[in-house]
Image: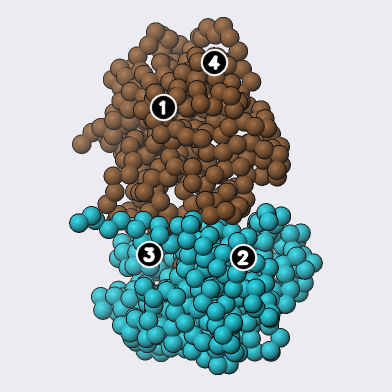
């Protein structure tokens, strides 16, 4: 079976073959194939710029792989600033011996994911490191996007804003946990990994007064809401029952003592919208298959500044904490 | 017939309407109580339910909770955490343990810090994985640092049984299994504790049977309700105890009848007895030395006992908590976390000075996180 060798990262003929057969073939665009030392870009508006490194075990999981993740992750960070994703860099760090077919599968899914936002990979780098130096493959992507709607910020939440979630929470974290720990549970649970830009573009086109957007990645919904409450010095009141959690995610949380609201997502975003636009925002979101269960989960108030309060259906309230430390299952 | 779903097992026991109805009934009946019902929920799992579902907000002021010592991580004295660290630092060794144990600091570092320093330390999801890891690493010593109350003991016993039966030569055990009844007796011993009712840990009782609490009503004249871990279970247990008080009874009752009997799981008990026996002494963080309050491997399994095999590298000096820590007093219901001078200042969940702050199930930790909540 063909595998990636140290020579593929050596800068010589093998490197060129890898670049031509794989990266140019799947990422092809005018800027990339010029093969200059740096990509030359023309940008007319204010830009957003972000970077993220991706490492996930297993590298292929139900609902995606590290390639899909590396594009969706960076594109989503741009989208959450109201920026249309335009140009990405991609840097691969590959452990010697990775199967060539796996690498090809990863690159293919990156290309497929790029098509969803129209963003292009315009520059890149490949390093191959000796076996044992890293776990199979790390990918770094950086991205530039043109700001289509300004003033979307963590510190822009206002009293009376409506908080929405684009879908149910916890899928990516629960999926990875299940696969990583080799839990013998049969489940059709899939990661929510997805490019969110089309939905954000839809909101901008419809002129929705979006105050804050954030994808609920590591730390999950709990982290986003707490970051917002602190940055905007407001209180977010959440109706616990309105937060969507699938039966599969709930089941895994039950067995291991996790909170679904703390689990990572890779295609789920949280919105703060002016209350008069809330209904319209929901209508827009529900047109996209990955947001068809978008719902209102709470409101912004001044009750406990910098805090997130969960209201239960049985009439009690508690603070929702920022998740701390690594995720460890409760013992009993 | 529809397939049974996991949620069918808990949905009804979290039903908002049922929760409100039970709370209402408790409130009505509690008007007739002539003293505050100070309920100790012994088990950290119950503390978690009480906090997560905000049950104190639904109950009248004369129903109070005193969070008990029932979290196996919280009660682990620092010198035994140092044992785990010393074992993990041995050459060619994999140390296995469960959950929060990774995070809790010993006298100098924690397992998490040592893991980051390159030692092979793994948190298991199920103790049975220890067998797999030992077989996959025949050239390494694999040490299972076993923790937990009676609930988790049979799982360790099962791993030991397989180790013995399969002749696995590289898997060793450091046993820290502790027992509920002696700890409760230690808290009640001086007669000063304010506790006048107990919610019995039900998962423990699935194994041991409710019989292990039989002496509590006799010795301390307190009602006991062995309750499940869902909010409806806890509230129903409280209701049973309020009724007992009103009727002048002090009895052992089982609320969690769907899994608990008086006798318990005899097979599991037998399995434990085969491999373990009571340990003469165990020091509980926050309470101190309690005789016969823990288990150890039987002498015929010395060849699996990490405490004996590696005794020369294990520290023996007891390490007490900070002298300002008042966990012991808090456990008796004689003080609230806020009464402690170091609470929230020198002692926080990130750098706990005492047992009650250590895990999310400890009372100081719960107060720290929920302080200021919510009438």
Q: CA distance from mark 1 to mark 2?
A: 41 Å
Give the SS element for disc 4.
loop
Nearest to N terminus: mark 4 or mark 1: 4
| Chain letter belonging to callout 3 | B
Residues packed near mark 4 inside 10 Å, few (<14), some (14 to 19) or many (20 plus): few
Q: Colour of chain B?
A: cyan
Residue B126 is labelled as 3
| Chain letter belonging to callout 2 | B
Farthest residue toward the bottom? B218
Q: Nearer the viewer, mark 2 or mark 3?
A: 2
| Chain letter belonging to callout 1 | A
Residues packed near mark 2 inside 10 Å, few (<14), some (14 to 19) or many (20 plus): some
Along the viewing direction, whichever of A306 and A160 lies nearer the viewer: A160
Q: Colour of chain A?
A: brown
Residue identifier under label 2: B59
Nearest to N terminus: mark 2 or mark 3: 2
Q: CA distance from mark 1 to mark 3?
A: 41 Å
Q: CA distance from mark 4 to mark 2?
A: 47 Å
Note whether A243 is above or below B267 in the view shown.
above
Along the viewing direction, whichever of B142 and A29 lies nearer the viewer: A29
Q: Nearer the viewer, mark 3 or mark 4?
A: 4
Residue B186: x and y in percent read 62, 86
Horizontally, residue A186 falls left or right of residue B63, namely: left
Residue A187: x and y in percent read 29, 49
| Chain letter belonging to callout 4 | A
- Please give the name of the residue rendered at 54% of the width and 15% of the height, measured from the top-left corner: A207
Residue A207 is labelled as 4
Residue identifier under label 1: A286
């Amino acid at each position: 079976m063909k595998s990636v060798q140290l020579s593929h990262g050596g800068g010589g003929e093998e490197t060129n073959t890898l670049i031509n057969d794989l990266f140019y073939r799947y990422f092809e665009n005018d800027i990339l194939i010029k093969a200059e030392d740096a990509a030359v870009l023309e940008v007319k508006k204010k830009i957003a710029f972000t970077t993220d490194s991706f490492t996930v075990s297993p590298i292929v999981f139900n609902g995606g792989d590290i390639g899909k993740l590396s594009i969706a992750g960076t594109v989503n960070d741009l989208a959450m600033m109201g920026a249309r994703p335009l140009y990405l860099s991609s840097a691969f760090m590959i452990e010697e011996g990775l199967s060539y077919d796996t690498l090809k599968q990863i690159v293919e899914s990156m290309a497929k994911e790029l098509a969803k936002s129209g963003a292009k990979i315009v520059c890149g780098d490949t390093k191959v490191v000796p076996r044992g130096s890293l776990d199979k493959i790390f990918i770094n992507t950086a991205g530039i996007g043109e700001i289509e709607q300004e003033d979307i910020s963590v510190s822009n939440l206002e009293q009376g804003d409506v908080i929405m979630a684009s879908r149910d929470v916890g899928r990516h974290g629960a999926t990875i946990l299940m696969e990583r720990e080799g839990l013998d549970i049969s489940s059709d649970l899939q990661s929510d990994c997805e490019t969110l830009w089309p939905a954000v573009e839809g909101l901008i086109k419809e002129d929705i007064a979006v105050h804050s957007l954030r994808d609920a990645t590591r730390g999950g919904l709990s982290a986003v809401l707490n970051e917002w409450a602190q940055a905007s010095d407001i209180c977010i009141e959440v109706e616990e029952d309105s937060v969507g959690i699938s039966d599969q995610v709930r089941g895994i949380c039950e067995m291991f003592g996790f909170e679904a609201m703390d689990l990572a997502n890779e295609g789920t975003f949280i919105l703060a919208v002016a209350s008069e636009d809330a209904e319209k925002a929901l209508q827009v979101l529900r047109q996209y298959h990955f947001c068809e269960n978008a719902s209102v989960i709470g409101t912004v108030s001044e009750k406990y500044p910098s805090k997130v309060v969960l209201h239960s259906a049985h009439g009690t309230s508690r603070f929702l904490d920022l998740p701390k430390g690594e995720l460890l299952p409760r013992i009993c | 017939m529809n397939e049974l779903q996991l949620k069918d097992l808990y949905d009804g026991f979290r039903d908002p309407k049922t929760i409100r109805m039970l709370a209402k009934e408790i409130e009505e009946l509690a008007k007739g109580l002539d003293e505050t019902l100070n309920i100790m929920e012994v088990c950290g799992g119950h503390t978690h339910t009480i906090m997560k579902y905000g049950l104190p907000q639904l109950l009248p002021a004369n129903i109070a909770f005193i969070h008990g010592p029932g979290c196996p991580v919280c009660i682990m004295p620092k010198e035994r955490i140092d044992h785990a660290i010393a074992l993990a630092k041995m050459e060619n060794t994999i140390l296995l343990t469960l959950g929060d144990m990774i995070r809790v600091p010993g006298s100098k570092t924690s397992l998490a810090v040592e893991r980051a320093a390159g030692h092979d330390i793994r948190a298991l999801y199920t103790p049975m994985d220890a067998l797999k890891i030992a077989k996959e690493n025949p050239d390494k010593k694999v040490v299972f640092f076993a923790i937990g109350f009676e609930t988790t003991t049979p799982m360790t016993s099962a791993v030991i049984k397989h180790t013995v039966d399969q002749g696995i030569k590289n898997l060793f055990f450091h046993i820290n299994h502790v027992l509920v009844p002696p700890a409760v007796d230690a808290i009640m011993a001086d007669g000063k504790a304010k506790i006048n009712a107990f919610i019995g840990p039900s998962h423990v009782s699935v194994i041991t049977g409710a019989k292990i609490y039989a002496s509590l009503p006799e010795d301390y004249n307190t009602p006991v309700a062995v309750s499940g871990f869902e909010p409806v279970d806890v509230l129903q247990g409280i209701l049973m105890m309020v009724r007992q008080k009103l009727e002048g009874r002090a009895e052992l009752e089982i609320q969690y009848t769907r899994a608990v009997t008086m006798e318990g799981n005899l097979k599991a008990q037998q399995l434990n007895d085969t491999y373990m026996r009571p340990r003469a002494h165990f020091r509980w963080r926050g309470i101190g030395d309690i005789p016969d309050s823990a288990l150890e491997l039987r002498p015929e399994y010395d060849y699996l006992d990490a405490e004996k095999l590696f005794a020369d590298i294990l520290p023996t000096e007891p390490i007490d908590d900070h002298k300002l820590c008042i966990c012991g007093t808090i456990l008796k219901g004689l003080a609230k976390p806020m009464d402690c001078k170091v609470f929230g200042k020198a002692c926080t969940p990130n750098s706990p000075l005492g047992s009650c702050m250590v895990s999310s199930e400890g009372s100081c930790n719960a107060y720290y996180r929920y302080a200021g909540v919510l009438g």
